[in-house]
Image: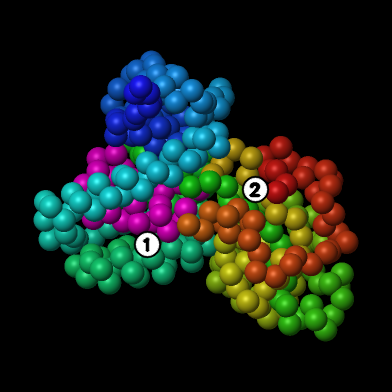
């Protein structure tokens, strides 16, 4: 007796992958060039065929269930292999040349640099211009081919890949705190130019606890101030948790409605070097998603009496405690 097993084709996987990477059924439909109702209907058929729910749908988006995450992982692997095959068969690797403009935030850039270096070693005819932007709105105005930023939704004319949550936390010099009580360190705040960014907003929220005594106007200056033992300051966990001179000393906070995206302009993102780099950066960041979210500190976080893990730390609805 033959029992027919449920089957999926690449079109089914592409639908699910688009929903996961764009964050909603509507955005997935736009990226695929079909109607919203078509994507909903096809997703319903896939879930019925598999007899399991793949996405939890909300008013402003959709997030994969456990079964959905497993299917998406397989879909990404297949999609990457298809892209690699296309490059090899079509000879597209011979066209990996030209200038790519990338806009990103300062601390995210630090996470990307190693992969950018590897990409340029693989494709020596590629040139990359990196612009540091304060938010996704200013990045989209820069005419960049690629944007890697925190955003609640991709800006008009852009599509791409959703990576996930990014955590921020207070950090202190490991050497300095070994010889001085942690309560004696003051806060190192960011300059007013960052106050409208998520980082600047969380900085103000946490800095209220210690009282701001010092400020820096660049991320490199901020890192050097922390390493020197000048005080306690906010860093993205993906940067702070990888620095052996620093140690986390407070709660991890994340923007409630914003996640990290790798975005490309719709008119350039489907071809050649831009497409290849977007996927490389997506894979690089996805492999580090837990660290970016603040779930993998190198050292056990220190306890600071002014940063208790309670509701008084999170006084702003835009942020959630990890």
Residue 18 position within the rendered picture, expressed as x and y whole percent measured from the top left? 38, 34
Question: Real-space Cα distance between discs 2 and 1?
Answer: 25 Å
Q: How is the image coloured?
A: rainbow
Q: Name the residue at 36% across, 48% down.
A: 77
What's the magenta region? 260-286
Earlier-in-chain disc, 2 versus 1: 1
Q: Name the residue at 35% across, 56% down.
A: 280
**Left-right relation of 168 to 37:** right
Residue 29 falls inside the magenta stretch: no
Kindly identify which numbered label has been placed on residue 74. none
User: How packed is label 1: few (under 14 Cα within 10 Å), some, or many (20 or more)?
Assistant: some
**Left-right relation of 58 to 14:** right
Question: Which residue does the numbered mark 2 point to in the structure image?
Answer: 254
Q: Name the residue at 85% across, 54% down.
A: 308
Q: Name the residue at 53% across, 38% down.
A: 152
**Disc 2 secondary structure class:** strand
Choose between 10 and 185: the one closer to the eye: 10
Q: Is residue 189 visible?
A: no
Q: Is residue 186 above or below residue 36?
A: below
Question: Which residue does the numbered mark 1 point to in the structure image?
Answer: 130
């Amino acid at each position: 007796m033959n029992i027919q097993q449920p089957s999926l084709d690449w079109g089914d996987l592409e639908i699910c992958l688009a929903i996961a990477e764009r964050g909603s059924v509507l955005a997935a439909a736009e990226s695929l060039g079909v109607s919203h109702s078509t994507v909903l209907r096809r997703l319903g058929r896939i879930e019925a065929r598999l007899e399991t729910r793949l996405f939890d749908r909300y008013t402003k988006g959709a997030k994969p269930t456990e079964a959905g995450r497993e299917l998406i992982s397989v879909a990404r692997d297949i999609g990457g292999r298809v892209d690699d095959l296309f490059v090899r068969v079509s000879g597209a690797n011979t066209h990996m040349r030209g200038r790519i403009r990338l806009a990103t935030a300062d601390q995210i850039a630090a996470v990307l640099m190693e992969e950018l270096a590897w990409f340029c070693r693989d494709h020596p005819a590629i040139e990359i211009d990196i612009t540091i932007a304060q938010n996704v709105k200013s990045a989209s105005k820069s005419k960049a081919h690629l944007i890697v930023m925190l955003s609640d939704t991709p800006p008009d004319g852009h599509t791409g890949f959703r990576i996930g949550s990014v955590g921020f936390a207070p950090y202190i010099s490991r050497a300095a705190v070994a010889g001085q009580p942690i309560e004696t360190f003051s806060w190192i705040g960011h300059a007013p130019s960052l106050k409208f960014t998520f980082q600047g907003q969380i900085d103000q929220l946490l800095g209220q606890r210690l009282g701001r005594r010092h400020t820096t106007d660049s991320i490199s200056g901020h890192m050097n101030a922390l390493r020197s033992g000048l005080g306690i300051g906010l860093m993205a966990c993906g940067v702070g948790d990888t620095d052996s001179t620093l140690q986390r000393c407070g709660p991890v906070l994340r923007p409630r409605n914003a996640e990290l995206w790798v975005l490309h302009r719709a008119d350039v993102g489907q071809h050649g070097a831009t497409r290849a780099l977007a996927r490389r950066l997506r894979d690089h960041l996805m492999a580090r998603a837990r660290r970016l979210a603040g779930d993998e500190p190198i050292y056990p976080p220190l306890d600071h009496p002014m940063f208790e893990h309670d509701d008084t730390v999170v006084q702003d609805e835009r942020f959630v405690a990890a």
